[in-house]
């Protein structure tokens, strides 16, 4: 099973970033999102499509339908700059290739 | 908290055993996982083990070479890596399943990673 992510996304400071994850009928699966800042371990920011772990700001939200899952970051901050990975389980855990978010 | 150890430089064909020590949660209740990341590349799942240790899973790319195990009495689990190749060069992270009980296949706590370099 293959997950397709944009290589990079740029967003102006304070605006909304949308990072997508494409896959066949992905809307039928549970999608999870991780944030990985430079030199650090990944952090779970969204699980099961739209749920935020404790400590993750409300600015992070997720949706999943059809062939696309989306991570939305509102009021983007410089601290949100990172690589973002989608992930699901399909026989085994599968990760997308990652999207680098730049906040301008 | 999770803390990996055991990484280092190894020759092709060599072996390493990675360890991951856990604290701050009831270790035996959670499946545990290994995920790797080649330098400058994306994340790749490597292996998982159930809370009891009775069920283990490894990626096709390491099947027959890597083995996962755990010691619940000491809150530690392992990745035994044999017949290493240059393609195994990566940071190896241990990661905890988000929910207790069954295997849920997504990860809410990660270690800082340990680097495995395979080179002659």
Image (tube, rainbow, N blue to C red):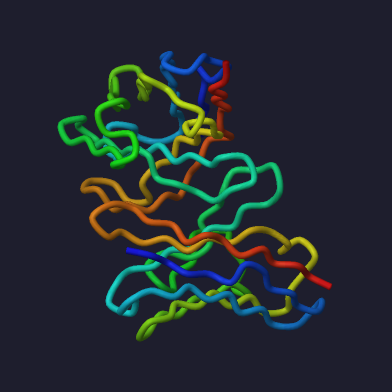
| Residue appearing at x 24%, y 39% in the figure | B57
Which residue is at 50% across, 36% downward?
B93
Which residue lies at the image location 22% right of the left edge and 46% below the top edge?
Answer: B101
Q: In terms of image quadrants, where is residue B23? A: top left
Q: Is residue B25 left or right of residue B105?
A: right
Residue B35's spot in the image, x, y percent?
A: 44, 41
Q: Residue placed farthest to the front in the image?
A: B120
- Which residue is more in the foreground, B19 or B8? B8
Dividing the picture into quadrants, the one containing residue A57 is bottom right
Using the image as rendered, state which of residue B59 and residue B79 is in the foreground.
Answer: B59
Asked which quadrant contains residue A24, the reply is bottom left
Looking at the picture, does residue B40 appear above or below residue B77? below
Which one is in front, A59 or B92?
B92
Q: Position of residue B43 (x, y in %)?
A: 50, 49
Quick check: B43 above or below A67? Answer: above
Q: Is residue A72 left or right of residue A21?
A: right
Relative placement, left or right, of A102 versus A83 is right
Give the x, y percent position of residue A48.
Answer: 37, 67
For the C terminus of chain B, give its image quadrant: top right
Judged left or right of residue A49, residue A1 is left
Between B82 and A60, the one lying in front of the other is B82
Q: Quick check: A34 above or below A24?
A: above
Q: What's the residue at 54%, 25% (across, down)?
A: B116
Instruction: Please tell me whether residue A12 is drawn above or below residue A3 in the rendered image.
Output: below
So how many labels did they put on this image?
0
């Amino acid at each position: 099973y293959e997950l397709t992510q944009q290589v990079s996304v740029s967003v102006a400071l304070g605006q909304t970033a949308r990072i997508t994850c494409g896959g066949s009928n992905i809307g039928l699966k549970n999608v999870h999102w991780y944030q990985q800042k430079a030199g650090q371990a990944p952090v779970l920011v969204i699980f099961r499509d739209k749920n935020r772990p404790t400590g993750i700001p409300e600015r992070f939200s997720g949706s999943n339908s059809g062939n696309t899952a989306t991570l939305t970051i509102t009021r983007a901050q410089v601290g949100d700059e990172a690589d973002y990975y989608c992930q699901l389980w399909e026989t085994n855990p599968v990760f997308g290739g990652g999207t680098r978010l730049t906040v301008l | 908290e999770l803390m990996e150890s055991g990484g280092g430089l190894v020759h092709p064909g060599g072996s390493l055993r990675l360890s991951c020590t856990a604290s701050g949660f009831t270790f035996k209740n959670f499946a545990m996982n290994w995920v790797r990341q080649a330098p400058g590349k994306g994340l790749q799942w490597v292996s998982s083990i159930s809370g009891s240790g009775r069920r283990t899973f490894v990626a096709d790319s390491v099947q027959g070479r890597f083995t996962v195990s755990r010691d619940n009495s000491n809150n530690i689990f392992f990745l035994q890596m044999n017949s290493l190749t240059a393609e195994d060069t990566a940071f190896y992270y241990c990661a905890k399943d988000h929910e207790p009980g069954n295997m849920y296949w997504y990860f809410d706590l990660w270690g800082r990673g340990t680097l495995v370099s395979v080179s002659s």
